[in-house]
Image (cartoon, rainbow, N blue to C red):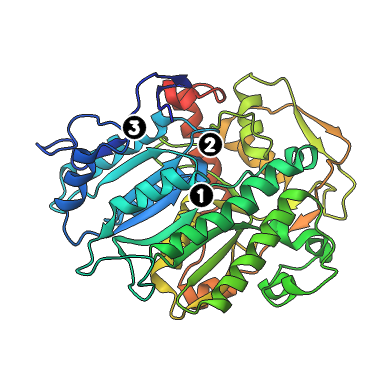
Amino acid sequence: MPCSTESGASSPSRFSSGSECDDINTSFTERSILFNDDDIDSSIHNSTGAQFILVVGGCGFIGSHTVWYFAKAGYNVIVVDNLSNAFSSVFLRLEMMVTDHYHASPKFRPSLKLYEADYRDVRAMRTILEAYEIPSPFQLSPDNPETSRISRISGVIHFAAHKAVGESIKNPLKYYSNNVGGLINFCSLLGDFGIKNFVFSSSATVYGTVANIGVPLREEYYGQKKVVQPGCSGLTNPYGRTKWMCEAILNDLAHADPEWTITALRYFNPIGCDESGQLGEDPRDAATNLMPVVLRVISGALPVLNIYGDDYDTPDGTAVRDYIHVTDLARGHLAALKSRADRGFRVYNLGSGRGQSVLELVAAMEEVSQTKIPTQIVGRREGDVGMCVAKATRAEIELGWRTEKTLETCCRDVWRFLERVGNVGNGAISNA
C-alpha cells in the first residue's frame, strides 16, 4: 500500500499519516510506518476513552470536507482511502487546517489519522479496526460468540464508491464490484467488531426517471419499501443501480439485526468548497460533473463547456439540478450521526429544494468570476434526466438539518479556490 506524499507521486516508503497534535511533543510528531505497533499503541492507549469517526474515502471532494467539518466539531477522525482518485496531500492540507483552527483555541485538538488502504481489503481493514478495539476483560474466541466486541469507533461514514455515471455505463462490473461487493464485505467486518452506526453516501440517481415528474422528490418515491419490490425500473445507469442495490442491502441488514443504525443520505448535486479556498474538487480522474468542468473552462484547460441537451422540459431547455454546497452536505453527515433518535434503516434527501438549470449555474459563475464562459450545445448525455430536485423536509424535521448556503455562495467559494490554485486537474490543489 504505497503512500503518495506529493501530488500523484508514489513513494517507495509506507506510512500511516498521523497528527495527534503535531505541534506538541507527542508520538505522532514523526511519520510512522503503516500498522507500526508502537505508533498504533501510542495513538490508542494515550487516548483512553477517546471516540473516533471512521471515514472511508475521506480524501475525496465530499469526504475531505466532511473530515474537516467533523474535526472542527471536535471529533477524532480516522481516514481510510486508497488514493485511487485523490491525493495524500489533501490529508496533509487537512492536518494544517485543523492545526491552524485549534492554534488559538482552548479546546483540545482532535486527532486525524490516514491509512492508505482499500476498504475492500479485508486483511488491512481488520488490522485497522483491531487497533481501535477496546480490550475485553474476557478472552474472545470463536467458541464464545456471545462475547461482544467494543470499539472506540463510534460511527462510520462511507464515501468509497465509484461515482461517474458515464464510466459506469462503459464499465459496469467495476461499479458492481466496488460499490456493491465492497459494501457487503465491509459491513460484515464492521459487524464483527460491534461497529453498527453507519452513514451511507447514496445518491439522487436512485430516483431514475421518476425525477422527471416535475416536482421535488420525496424519499417515498423510491424509498425503503419500494426497493425490495420487483420491477423497479427507471434507473438510467449502473451507478444508480449500485446505489439502489446498496440501499436495499442496508435495509435488509438493519431489519435482520436491530442493533444497526443505518442512515442513507441521498445527495443531489454537491458543489462549492470550503470558504477558505484550501479544499476543493480536484480528483485524479477527469471529473465529468458540471462545476469542475466549468472551472477547467475558466482556467483555460478546456476551450468550451459542453451543455448536454437544450430540449428538456425545463424553463430554458437545459437540465435542472438541486445544487447543494458541500459544507451543507458535510453538516448533514454530522446531523445523521448525532440526531438519529431510533435504530434501523432510514433514508434522507440532502438538497436545497430549489432547482437551477445548467445555464443558470453558468450565469452565476460568470457573474462571480466576471468571466465569459464559452458554451456549446451538444446532444443529451446517456444516463441523464432532465430534472432532479429534492424535497428535504424529512431531514429538517428529524435531523434538524437544512441548507444554509446559496448558489451564489457556492460559486464565490469555488472562485476563491480557483484563484488560489490557478488551475484544476492533475492534483492542482496538491501543488498549491
Q: Disc 1 vs disc 3: Cβ atoms closer than 8 Å? A: no
Residue 326: mark in rendering? 1
Q: Which amino acid does label 3 sit on?
A: Leu
Residue 92: mark in rendering? 3
Residue that numbered label 2 is attached to: 281
Q: In this view, does 121 lie to the left or right of 235?
A: left
Q: Which of marks 2 and 3 is in front?
A: 3
From the top left corner, tell me how far across and down residue 340 is, in percent.
Answer: 44, 75
**311 is higher (above) or lower (below) than 258:** above
Callout 1: 10 Å neighbours few (<14), some, many (20+)?
many
Counting residues from the N terminus, which is met first, the one under dot 2 or under dot 3?
A: 3
**245 is higher (above) or lower (below) than 430:** below
From the top left corner, tell me how far across and down residue 203 is, in percent.
Answer: 64, 56
Tell me the SS state at disc 2: loop
Q: Disc 1 vs disc 2: Cβ atoms closer than 8 Å? A: yes
Q: Which amino acid does label 1 sit on?
A: Val
Residue at horizontal 36%, vertical 47%?
Answer: 127
Q: Nearer the viewer, residue 186 or 389?
A: 186
On-image quarter of the C terminus: top left
Q: Give the distance between the C-alpha atoms of the residues marked 1 and 3, in whole angstroms.
A: 20 Å
Residue at horizontal 33%, vertical 67%?
Answer: 149
Image quarter of residue 79? top left
